Image (spheres, helix red, strand yellow):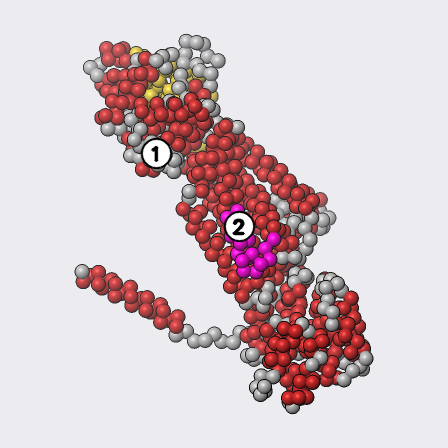
Amino acid sequence: MTDPGSALRVSDLHKTVHVGFRRQKVVILKGVDLEVRPNDVFGLLGPNGAGKTTTVKVCLGLMRPSAGAVELGVPGVSHVGYLPENPYFYDYLSGREFLGFCGRLFGLDPHLRRERVEALLRDVGLERAADMHLRKYSKGMLQRVGIAQALINDPELVLLDEPMTGLDPVGRVEVKRIIQELHERGKTVLFNSHILSDVAELCTRIAIMRDGRVVWTGAVDEALAEAPSLEDFFMRVVTT
Amino acid sequence: MNQVLAIALNTFKETIRDRVLAVIVVFALVMIAGGLWLGSISLGEQGRMMKDFGLVAVTFFGLIVAVFIAASLVHKEVEKRTVFVLFSKPVSRASFITGKFLGLCGTMAVVLAGMGVFLFLLVWAVAGDATGMLLVAVLMIFVQLLAIMAVTIFFSTLGSAILASVLGICVFVAGQLSHNVLSLTRLGDNPVTKALSWVVYVVIPNLSSVDVKAGVVGESTLSWGEIGVWSLYLLAYVVVVLALATLVFRRKEF
Amino acid sequence: MLRRLLVVLVVLACAAGVIGYQATRPPRAPANPRMFVPSPQFFTDFSPSFRTSIADAYYLMMVQYYGEHVNGDGRLDSLPALTQLVTSLSPRFTRAYLFSAFALVDAERPDVGYALLQRGLKANPDDWRFPAYLGFFAYRYGAGKDKDLVAARWYQLAASIPGSPSYLPRLAAVLAARGGDQEKAVLMWGQVYLAGDKYVRKRAVNELNGILPTDKAARMRAVAPLYQTMPKAEADALVGELFKGYVQ
């Protein structure tokens, strides 16, 4: 169990995979150090292939670390919510059925489950589409139901991988509102995003990854003090 | 337990709504009804022909459904990345494998019950000699297919869905030849080949131990004790294979 | 519009071609009277769970083979092997024995038919039809002066099996008493008609037509014993066929 000061601590995380018929060795993470404090809205940034998604997967136990350690500041994955990148769900289920299924996986009792499902459908603006099969949902609607399933268990730590993908401006505003509300309720949020304006607006702290390592970590204000915009700061960090 | 049931119910919904399944079942019913034509050229043995060929059709189509759906169950979740939704929650690999298997069992039970009842009613209406034994035979086909489903799920955790389905069918065929493998264990003097034969004999499910079809057509008298022991053996086999599948699946990363 | 019309015409022409091709295929050449028949051991070894299904498949094949050749080239070379296969895989498949026994007569192998019925009796000791048929075979196709007695013993055995018809003892008695050949023959063929399928019944009628007197009154006297050894309905049906063409 980690110290109460961290919601998530990653220490010297290494991850190597073997791909292809010849089992070629690919080193994805080369010693990632990361600390997310309680109630942070933490942005994990980096170019494609930097290892952001892999880091999150190792934190969740979807992948095993080759070396290093991950310590969750919450009592297990039952207190974590996760939205994968480009989510795909069970297209033969309706939105309501899918959220109910996710609630069952957390062992929520039926009454609480029903309440949460309805509340989340309202929160993400999917009340009217709740009984439609997910195969008929647009990308934006899928993203919203994905956020809803990440919150079904009222998690203390929420990991969102590219939560704004596919959302129209209205959807993005709603997601930002949800993230802000989570922060106001004392939750910890970690999200990956390429939309740096959103990161600048929402995040308290960020880490920038490049080539399997964290190359910079700190408060957003610190980054903005060193460059006119977060984009400029980001470009400077990843290109030097 | 909640997770197992949730995954089982989800799997049942997924598989029972599959259009390919509906097509296969329609074909199966057509084949079963085809026994009517065979019966008409059998010089008065309509009942026997309908029962025998009907049970062969139930076995054959049941096998196709079992193998092809079982092979894709795990594979689809990994391909479509719905595993991220599942395993980011407090769901163990064992619950996942068990839930998937139970969900498919539910679907197979519905499919086989439908085919079995159809066959029973057809035989009763046309030949008038349908007995409860016919439904027992369908139940035993179901139990055999449970073993094949478990084996196919195991193979699907190792490789592709196509390979798993081919291997599942091979195991079914091998299971019918189980007694031949037993003979091999007694042939020759080489202890190594005998030991290997014995291992193969134990590993392959014995699907030919009791011939329920012969009992249905009056060829032999069935012993309930034998059927009971055989069923328990197959259920135990399922448990072992699913445990192995879980062990393999635990090593998988997504 | 023109293109669509052209496509429709092409499709219709192809459909006509498909139907026309199939409709103009020449009739199938007569099948080879010698067909490959695997040994029963092969199937017993490799698919014990499906042996009855395989027996059924070969039974149907056997019926088709018989029907095709008995009215065609008359050659039934593979029939003994087929009957052996079917009855070995499914020893309690009674119909297969009973059909095969008479089919083997057409293959000029009544001895094989007799042996087949004996095997059938061994596998089905509680079925009176086997000793009853054996009795017929012994009488009709047996040799030597004791054949009537042998037939009588078979009928006595048949009569002793629970469920056998009540007139069997009379048959046995007639044979044992060495009654007139014609009366015995009429009774035997009546039994065959009673228990047989459509092919066997046709044979029974033909044989009876061959041995019965043509004079109507004599013919009626000759067929009268049938009513003592057959249920009335079946006896009526048989007599009806034997008196086809006779003025009422």
Residue A105 vs residue A54, the one in the foreground: A105
Residue C100 vs residue C229, the one in the foreground: C229
The region drawn magenta spans: B113-131
Is residue A89 one of those drawn in magenta? no
- Residue at 43% x, 76% y is C26
- Residue at 39% x, 28% y is A99
Residue A131 disc label: 1
Specify whether A92 is left or right of B212.
left
The quadrant holding residue C207 is bottom right
**Residue C35 position (above or below residue C4):** below
SS assignment at label 2: helix
The quadrant holding residue C105 is bottom right
- Residue at 61% x, 50% y is B132
Residue A101 vs residue B127, the one in the foreground: B127
What separation in Å lies between label 1 and label 2 (alpha carbons)?
Answer: 34 Å
Residue C19 disc label: none
- In the picture of the structure, the residue carrying the numbered disc 2 is B117
Residue C140 percent across, percent down from the top left: 72, 79
- Chain ID, mark 2: B
Residue B2 percent across, percent down from the top left: 50, 28
Q: Mark 2: give few (<14), some (14-19) or many (20+) Cα within 10 Å.
A: some
